Amino acid sequence: MRGTDVSGSDGVAAYQRIATELRSRIARGTYLPDDRLPSLAELQAEFGVSNTVIKSALAILRNEDLIVGQQGKGVYVRSDVTPGAVRMPVDVAALAAQVAQLQEQVGVLAERVAVLEDSAS
């Protein structure tokens, strides 16, 4: 829903998803040190959310010392940020869910291999 901060199907709030995406762009070097980020209006249009959600996402990055605002000029990647060294936060719950899913898939594959081995002998 446009303009809200509701959680998506993954249970992560919109501002957190946007912060993660922007952090990832900085980490990959899409936005380099001293680069100006897109304006609030451009980010709103890109992500389909309200100004408040964008500001919340930017506040996270500001608290992580990745960006800095310059009054009347915009928001910039800090000059001392090294793109490859940007640490992405670990979502332990999401990783645990992925591991559980992979374990289930391996179990199913093991059963299928056992059936194939039995039929081959």
Image (cartoon, grey):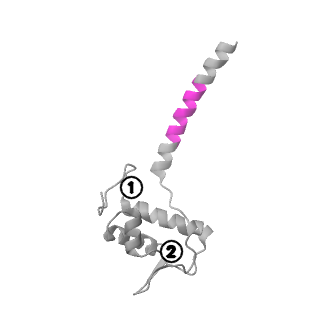
Q: Position of residue 100 (x, y in %)?
A: 50, 39
Q: Is residue 117 left or right of residue 35?
A: right
Question: Which residue is rendered at x = 67% and y = 18% of the image?
Answer: 117
Q: Position of residue 56 (x, y in %)?
A: 36, 69
In the rendered view of the protein, which quadrant contains the N terminus? Answer: bottom left
Question: Which residue is rendered at x = 58% and y = 28% of the image?
Answer: 109
Question: Which residue is rendered at x = 36% and y = 62% of the image?
Answer: 48
Q: Nearer the viewer, residue 2 or 113?
A: 2
Q: Which residues are magenta?
A: 99-111
Q: Which residue is mark 2?
A: 66
Image quadrant in which you'd find residue 16: bottom left
Mark 2 residue type: Leu
Asked if the magenta segment contains residue 74, the reply would be no
Q: Residues within 10 Å of mark 1 (few under 14, many from 20)?
A: few
Q: Secondary structure at mark 1?
A: loop
In the rendered view of the protein, which quadrant contains the C terminus? Answer: top right
Q: Position of residue 22 (x, y in %)?
A: 48, 67
Instruction: Give the numbered dot on residue 12.
Output: 1
Q: Is residue 70 above or below residue 7?
A: below
Mark with earlier residue (2, 1): 1
Q: Is residue 87 left or right of residue 48?
A: right
Q: Position of residue 19 (x, y in %)?
A: 44, 65
Q: Is residue 97 above or below residue 15?
A: above
Q: Is residue 52 left or right of residue 81?
A: left
Asked if the magenta segment contains residue 109, the reply would be yes
Mark 1 residue type: Val
Image quadrant in which you'd find residue 86: bottom right
Q: CA distance from mark 2 to mark 1?
A: 21 Å
Q: Residues within 10 Å of mark 2 (few under 14, many from 20)?
A: many
Q: Number of numbered discs present?
A: 2
Q: Secondary structure at mark 2?
A: loop
Dominant secondary structure of the residues highlighted in magenta in the image: helix
